[in-house]
Image (cartoon, grey):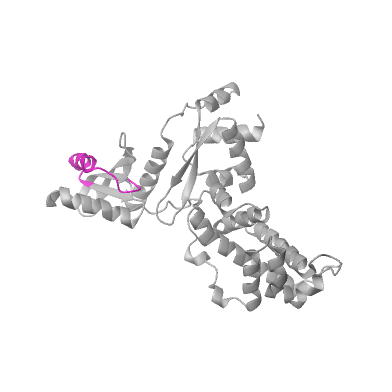
Amino acid sequence: MPASVLRYLTDIARDPCVPALERDARLGHSRYEGVQLRRSLIDAAFVRAHRVPLGGQSGQVLLLEVTAAGCERLRTAGVHVEDTAGGDVVGRFHRERLATLARDRWAGASVEPVAGLAGITVHADLPDGGPRRLALLYDRDGDVSVTTVRALIAAHDRVYVWTGSDRSAKRVRRRLDRTLLDDLRRTVECEPLPSRAGEASRPLSRAHQLRPRRQYSALAAALIEAYTHLHNLDWLEASPAAAHPGVKRRANPLSVMPEAQALRELLVRAAERTAVLTRDIPPQRPLGIFLERYLAGDTVAEIARDLGVSREWCSRAYRPQAFALAALQAERLLLTAPPVAI
């Protein structure tokens, strides 16, 4: 086993609740390298993958769990790790999210897991009443049973049920309103669980959103649209961008569909440069990865799967923003760089 693969497998065994993209960044791997490492370990049956939806528009994360075969392979290599096969990695991940939330909300809080549930018990000092014993439970779809909530109420001063969306939270609240007495209902709160700070699939904040399309120049808008048809020379030939003087100067009259070829080469060059420039900008790294994979001919679904987000989020957020960044780069190349020699 190559040293890089062994190191990656060891890191998974020692800290399985780290999302895949966050692990890649921590170990200094590019997104492509991380995908290749994960595929080799999954194909060898040394790890199993868990895609964990985060709820709302937060997409999903990819968690990796070392199998019994993977643990045995590590022991053979002289690496001592705890055998975590079958250790409920997804439940641990959600409990860690809840613990992070609890410590952010109540300074100095101590936490312990609730057996059999994606939940934790929190010991914290509340401003309105001193030391309290709190229960935090995560239920993405709002399917938690009233019996479970009653058991938590009996052992805690207050219960928080965190869900994956506003709709799920309202669903839990309606069920509790129908079945619990008033004094018990007042001890339970239901709301969506925020994304954990720093999660790889976290949506870009408004501070990092690109300008609305209506503010783009006519040339940039044409280049953005051209990216959606990058692999279609017939469409590019008829694109308004192909008629730009800078594109025509770069066209080789001896080639088939010269303006379309010249425009496509410009778009590819700009996307490649954009991918390189975004590697050191954490909020925009997924956009660079999207461009690299798009240039390679991968579908949105394939790119979304490896980025650990839903196809809808990748299509609605990453694709338009990646195309816009690359189009602005292409516009600068077109307006400032000399024509390519033929």
Of 209 and 124, which appears nearest the observer? Answer: 209
Of 288 and 80, which appears nearest the observer? Answer: 288
Left or right: residue 245 versus residue 203 is: right
Compared to 257, does 280 lie above or below? above
Residue at image location 36% in from the left, 44% down from the top: 99
Left or right: residue 90 versus residue 276 is: left
Residue at image location 53% in from the left, 73% down from the top: 212
Left or right: residue 57 versus residue 297 is: left
Residue 276 visible in image: yes
Of 42 and 131, which appears nearest the observer? Answer: 42
- Quarter holding the N terminus? top right
In the rendered image, residue 35, in percent from the top left (x then y), is placed at: 60, 43
Report the span colored magenta: 139-158
- Quarter holding the C terminus? bottom right
Residue at image location 56% in from the left, 44% down from the top: 26
Residue 187 visible in image: no
Q: Is residue 56 magenta?
A: no
In the rendered image, residue 64, in percent from the top left (x then y), is placed at: 51, 38
In the rendered image, residue 322, in percent from the top left (x then y), is placed at: 59, 62
In the rendered image, the residue lying farthest to the front is 234
Q: Is residue 147 magenta?
A: yes
In the rendered image, the residue lying farthest to the top is 76
Residue at image location 77% in from the left, 67% down from the top: 262
Compared to 300, does 229 lie above or below? below
